[in-house]
Image (cartoon, rainbow, N blue to C red):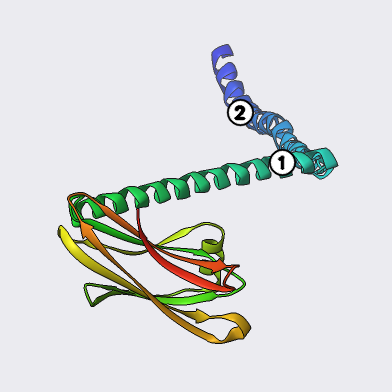
């Protein structure tokens, strides 16, 4: 009897007990989950607070006169370095062009047959050079018209290479015809000739134009170097 009563009591009580245990488990789970749900909004609030704090910090970072000056100095140094690099490159190109021109002259005009003709100018009062025609052995080999900038360069002592070619050894005649303006702006034409002997090796001839104070007119000369 005791065993049956116990079993019967256990069956009824067990149902109630399991029901209560189920409710208790649900409540425990709810209580356990409560802090997690409550903590999530708190976490979001902290992130928002961190972002707002970072935004405030960025807003407080401003450019001062010192930082602006340093930035400008760095930029200027970079520009100066770039300018130096460009100038070095230009100088390298100029040097290369000179070397190439010398090499070209050596190939096209061997030293034994090379013939140079230059123009020099020392005038200003009695003549203004405008152009030159050059004839070698009655054959026109060069004509040239001068600009104001070129005349200024010649007046400062420069020499213009009017002609470069090959010339065989022997007797030759060189004639130059100068065109320009004389005193009072009148047109002026004058010719000058030179008979010379070309030998082995390079030959240089200068066409010189100069004012003559004694004669108050320009003088035209063709002379050998």
Q: Which residue is mark 2?
A: 18
Foreground mark, 2 or 1? 1
Asked whether 180 or 70 is in front, the reply is 180
Q: Taking the image as drawn, is residue 9 in sight?
A: yes
- The image quadrant of residue 51 is top right
- Compared to residue 76, the image places residue 191 above or below, namely below
Mark 2 to mark 1 CA distance (whole Å): 83 Å
Asked whether 154 or 51 is in front, the reply is 154
Q: Is residue 141 left or right of residue 217?
A: left
Q: Residues within 10 Å of mark 1 (few under 14, many from 20)?
A: few
Q: Is residue 148 left or right of residue 24?
A: left
Query: Disc 2, disc 1: CB below 8 Å?
Result: no
Give the mark nearer the N terminus: 2 vs 1: 2
Give the percent coordinates (x, y) of residue 185. Answer: 60, 85
Give the percent coordinates (x, y) of residue 213. Answer: 60, 67
- The image quadrant of residue 117 is bottom left
Q: Residue furthest bottom?
A: 186
């Amino acid at each position: 009897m005791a065993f049956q009563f116990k079993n019967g009591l256990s069956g009824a009580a067990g149902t109630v007990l399991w029901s209560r245990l189920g409710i208790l488990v649900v409540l425990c789970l709810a209580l356990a989950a409560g802090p997690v749900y409550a903590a999530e909004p708190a976490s979001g609030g902290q992130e928002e607070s961190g972002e707002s704090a970072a935004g405030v910090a960025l807003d407080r970072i401003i450019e001062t006169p010192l930082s602006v000056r340093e930035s400008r100095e760095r930029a200027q140094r970079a520009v100066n370095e770039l300018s130096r690099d460009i100038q070095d490159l230009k100088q390298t190109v100029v040097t290369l062009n000179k070397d190439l021109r010398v090499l070209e002259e050596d190939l096209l005009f061997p030293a034994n047959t090379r013939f140079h003709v230059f123009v020099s100018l020392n005038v200003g009062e009695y003549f203004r050079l405008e152009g030159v025609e050059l004839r070698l052995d009655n054959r026109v080999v060069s004509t040239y018209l001068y600009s104001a900038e070129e005349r200024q360069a010649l007046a400062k002592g420069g020499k213009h290479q009017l002609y470069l070619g090959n010339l065989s050894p022997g007797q030759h005649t060189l004639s130059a015809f100068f065109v320009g303006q004389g005193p009072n702006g009148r047109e002026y034409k004058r010719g000058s000739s030179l008979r010379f002997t070309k030998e082995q090796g390079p030959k240089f001839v200068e066409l010189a134009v100069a004012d003559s104070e004694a004669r108050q007119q320009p003088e035209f000369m063709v002379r050998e170097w």
